[in-house]
Image: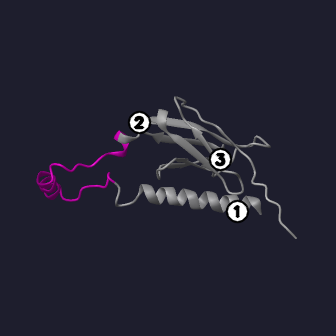
Amino acid sequence: MKQIILFIVFTFTTMMCAFAQNSNSSPTAKIKNKKKSEQILENNKDQFSISPNGIFKDVIKGIVYDAKTKEPLIGANVIEYGTANAAVTDIDGQYKIKVSNASQKILVASYVGYVTQTKKIGGLEVVNFFLEEYQQTLDK
């Protein structure tokens, strides 16, 4: 049962990440009419689009583990704190996320049934997480 739930969470998260990347509101959307776009840019000289590749410079990678078993967690979320910038761990528990100004950023790792953990990146290029299972007792 746990494996089925993990698979569903992983699939849903992967689909949401793919949807966000293919969104039409993306600053890297394709230009359909070049003349019209040049006219819009000429009329709005103060406005410009920003490419995500220019914003996100530092690549942080790592693995998300179960703290007790030391097994990698598949489908765990790693999010840049305060943004929608996120990554999902693969079958080996590995993630890779691009961030801007990594020395001042915080990463948040979460997984269903586990306690969320935050870590300041500092000057690190590899940030591993060891998540502990959420322990809650039920009253009778």
Residue 48 locus on image (x, y percent): 23, 49
Q: Amino acid at mark 2?
A: Lys
Q: Amino acid at mark 1?
A: Ile
Q: Earlier in the sequence, mark 1 or mark 3?
A: 1
Nearest the viewer among 32 and 93 is: 93
Q: How many numbered discs sit on the rendered protein?
A: 3
Residue ranking furthest to the front: 139
- Distance Cα–Cα, label 2 vs label 3: 25 Å
Residue ranking furthest to the top: 123
Identify the residue at image location x=70%, y=62%. Answer: 5
SS category of the residue bearing label 1: helix
Q: Amino acid at mark 3?
A: Ile
Residue 57: assigned label: 2
Q: Which residue has dot 3 on it?
A: 91
- Distance Cα–Cα, label 1 vs label 2: 34 Å
Residue 50: assigned label: none
Verify whether residue 137 appears in magenta: no
Q: Quadrant of the N terminus?
A: bottom right
For the record, the magenta segment spans: 27-54
